[in-house]
Image: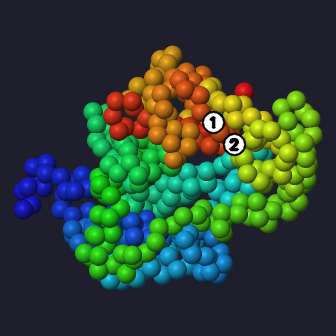
Amino acid sequence: MALDWTHGRLNSLGFAKPPSETRVVVAMSGGVDSSVVAAQLAEEGYDVVGVTLQLYDHGAALAKKGACCAGRDIHDARRVAEDMGFPHYVLDYENVFKDAVIDEFADSYLGGATPVPCIRCNERVKFKDLLETAKDLDADCMATGHYIQRKVGEHGAELHSAADANRDQSYFLFSTTPAQLEYLRFPLGHLASKAETRALAAKYGLSVADKPDSQDICFVPNGDYASVIEKLRPGAGEPGDIVDMDGNVLGKHDGVIHYTIGQRRGLGVGGLSAPLYVVKLDVDKKHVIVGPKEALATRKIPVREINWLGDAPFDSQDEWHVGVKVRSTRAPAGAIIRPISATEAEVELLTPEEGVSPGQACVFYDDGSSRIFGGGWIWRGY
């Protein structure tokens, strides 16, 4: 058998050595996806080390269902490791998570943006600090339960959408760098459905086989962003005026943090002939600006902090013709990217989209394949 490995044969993780000599750190959230990854790799004979991050107050988390990295989830991850016979560690990342994710989330909302903290968590915690921890443990790679594919192309590792479009998490992983991509593995990305994952969990006898998927942002109970922000930033909910696009006062509000671009319900402005939508938030004036639906249409989007995963340098040509997503739930739409620098660009949508908001991600897709070319952050409106 040894001759096979020394003559270029690769194991399922892409290394020219037996699984038993390949150490892989599995980022375990306690959910079914990462548990299946760990169990599968352990069964294949890899030297598996499970690591779970404690990201926020353990005591408060115990009472919170449907969120990742809570107390119950740590227990579930530990149990899977015990059942499958590999070591498991819990690392306290509360301070890192607060500094890198929660504080920016609160400040972004206060600035009138609509942040996506799950992307920042992957970028600044899981694929940065945890990845470095995996290297400190002498792991050959780190595996996660994300639904996305890593393929090796002519120029190295490439990021591709998951086989199951309904589970694809590429929007949340666009900021994965080429260096990180070389080290990461995503064993579930090729599966056709979540049902296949649950079937594997049942096959391995995992206690989490029927565990529900997490739904909320882990530190935001019941999706109530405003209450979390007010707790983090007392006095954040300052009242102000709801105004139309000409500046006429239509009503009052209890704080800009209660509103997002594109919102229609709960404006508290009645008696008008046509429905109104939030089209802009002016934090300095404490104004919630409303207008007709057509005022939401956006064609040009300024994007910065771009992470480019194409083969040629981002600013090596004047235009890139791609598909882009400005929300995780939307399919990629045709666009032209015009680089301003290596990390900044103007994105022109071929068909205007509604509800584009600063703080959201703009992710780039190859029109002719499943490949992701990276993306950046929408940072202001025109």
Q: Which mark is residue 48?
A: none
254 horizontally vs 303: left or right: right
Vertical side of 79 occupied by 328: above or below: above
Viewer-proximal residue among 108 and 277: 277
Question: Which residue type does callout 1 highlight?
Answer: Glu
| Image quadrant assignment for residue 192 | bottom left
Is label 1 in a helix, a strand or a loop? loop
User: Residue shown at 52%/46% (left/top)?
Assistant: 328
- The crowding category of the residue bearing disc 2, from other C-alpha atoms within 10 Å (few below 14, some 14 to 19, many at least 20), is many
Res 360 visible: yes
Vertical side of 159 occupied by 55: above or below: below
Vertical side of 29 occupied by 360: above or below: above
139 horizontally vs 243: left or right: left
Which residue is disc 2 drawn over?
262
Is label 2 in a helix, a strand or a loop? loop
Question: Which residue type does callout 2 highlight?
Answer: Gly
User: Residue shown at 87%/52% (left/top)?
Assistant: 253
Viewer-proximal residue among 75 and 211: 211
| Image quadrant assignment for residue 321 | top left
Which image quarter holds the N terminus? bottom left
Kindly check if marks 2 and 1 are in contact, taking CB atoms under 8 A apart as contact.
yes
Which residue is disc 1 drawn over?
354
